[in-house]
Image (cartoon, rainbow, N blue to C red):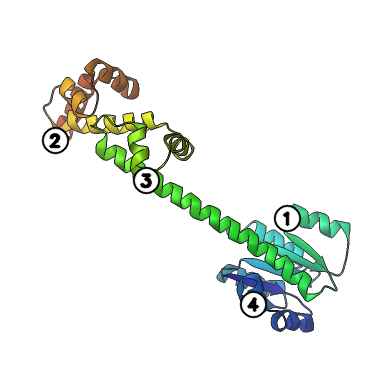
Amino acid sequence: MYTLLIVEDEEILLERLLKTIDWKIAGVDKVIGKTNSEEALKVVMTENVDVILTDIRMPIIDGLDLAEFIKNGRKRPYVIFMSAYKEFEYAHRAIKLGVMDYILKPFSKEEVLEAVKRAVEKLNTENIRQDISNCYEDVVDIVINFITVNCSRQISLNDVAEYVHLHPVYLSRLLKNRTGKTFKEILTEARLKKAEKLLKNSSLKHYEIAEAVGFSDAQYFSQVFKKAYGMTPIEWRRKAAEKETKLKI
């Protein structure tokens, strides 16, 4: 459910909007009314406002200035203008400010309710997209963790796809879109990070480390390692040992 802020300097109209319309029909469960933009700004900064229904012509700070402030803010509720003036300049600036709707006075309850409904529908769509995006992020985290834990094994994209119950092609695209890397790149990165630890903390030979982190060919392991680190595994181990000795001194 959402919060609606109504800003109208005509107190009678504001009262009518607050008390004679069933906003719950539009998916709004909280309605706040203010008679000027200064008070409205305080609400925007302290409340989680989703939709603003505001008059354009108001003293000191008008609806256009209010919309501009909101556009430059962190949270951007949808703005709907109410106006008795069908002026091109108002409409043009409203479009530039990204205002969602523009309704002319006098308007019926149905008109204003429909305008708010449209804003709520957009909010619902955004929330669904965000939920899907969060779900994708969770899947990617699960995949990367699976790869990290199992990188020593000969795992394939198909193995990971089966683990998360996704089609391999779809998973491949998802990984690329979310991480900028292919499955093979992520797997190789995980193997090389594990190789680093073994080179630094074990006495295993480089060909034994290659096998331990999932490379079946020690020479290929050295080539991949050098491409990533600019030196062979043996050189990297020597430099790491020298650095460790200096730190102890």
Distance from the alpha carbon under mark 4 to that under mark 3: 40 Å
Residue 42 found in image quarter: bottom right
- Residue type at mark 2? Lys
CB under 8 Å between callouts 4 and 3? no
176 shown above or below 39: above
Q: Position of residue 64 (x, y in %)?
A: 76, 62
Distance from the alpha carbon under mark 4 to that under mark 2: 65 Å
- Residue type at mark 1? Leu
Q: Nearer the viewer, residue 157 or 120?
A: 157
Q: Nearer the viewer, residue 180 or 56?
A: 180
Task: Check disc 2 and report its element: helix, strand or loop.
Answer: helix
Distance from the alpha carbon under mark 4 to that under mark 1: 23 Å
Q: Which residue is mark 4?
A: 32
Position of 230 with respect to 34 (left or right) is left
Q: Which residue is mark 2?
A: 248
N-term-proximal mark, 4 vs 1: 4
16 shown above or below 171: below
Q: Quadrant of the C terminus?
A: top left
N-term-proximal mark, 4 vs 3: 4
N-term-proximal mark, 2 vs 3: 3
- Residue type at mark 3? Asp
